[in-house]
Image: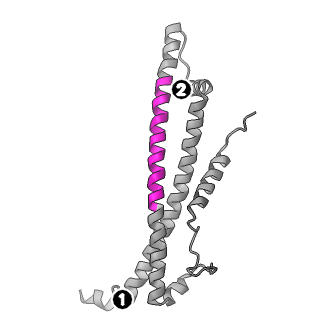
Amino acid sequence: MKKRWNAVDALAKAKSYMDTLEIPEFITGFESGDYKAPTFKDLITATPDEIGKYLIYFGAYRALLEQHVADLESRKGAMSAHFDEIYNVMSFELLREYDMKGEKRPTKEATRGEIFLKNDDLGDLRRNIIEIEAMYQQALGRLKLYSSAVATISRVVTVRTGGFDGDRRERN
């Protein structure tokens, strides 16, 4: 008997996908074997070379995540369009059968259930869309995390270079 699918399966696949990207959940060190995540204190006291490394590190992972998010979004869109197309055709055909028999049309929910009972592939496609959506949301969350890290480091650079000088604002 085939194992029943559930949302936990979708989340497990999403986690597995994120693991294959080899993008740290957040901020590991730059030296091999050094996995100490930098703290805000580290960032404030970091040398210009260290800040440059942070920007490269976070920026590179952000760029990679942007590509993966775009890929997942396009896959999700294509799969959703395919699902909608099949579902709409099957719904039309099913309701036409009821009309031709002179029977009362089923409710929207009953129609959906009957369509899924008649077409296992459509159910599989819907589950795949849910799994892709979970992957997309996890990748998007990590992208936001890395984007925020780049923004924070950029603000530190701005403060250090005098781009945010209180005296300068008062003169303007």
Q: Is residue 70 above or below residue 109?
A: below
For badge 2, the amino acid type reads Lys
Mark nearer the N terminus (1 vs 2): 2
Residue 128, given in percent of the width and then of the height, sits at: 57, 42
Judge whether residue 29 is colored magenta.
no
Secondary structure state at the residue bearing disc 1: loop
Residue 148, given in percent of the width and then of the height, sits at: 47, 71
Question: Residue placed farthest to the right in the image?
Answer: 1
Query: What segment carries the magenta color?
Result: 66-90
**Residue placed under numbered mark 2 in the picture:** 108
Distance between mark 1 and mark 2 Cα atoms: 62 Å
> Split into 4 quadrants, where in the image is the C terminus?
bottom left
**Residue placed under numbered mark 1 in the picture:** 161
Q: Answer yes or no: do the residues labelled 1 and 2 have beta carbons within 8 Å?
A: no
Q: What colour-coding does the image apply?
A: one colour
Q: Is residue 149 above or below residue 72?
A: below
Magenta segment main secondary structure: helix
> Split into 4 quadrants, where in the image is the N terminus?
top right
The numbered disc on residue 123 is none
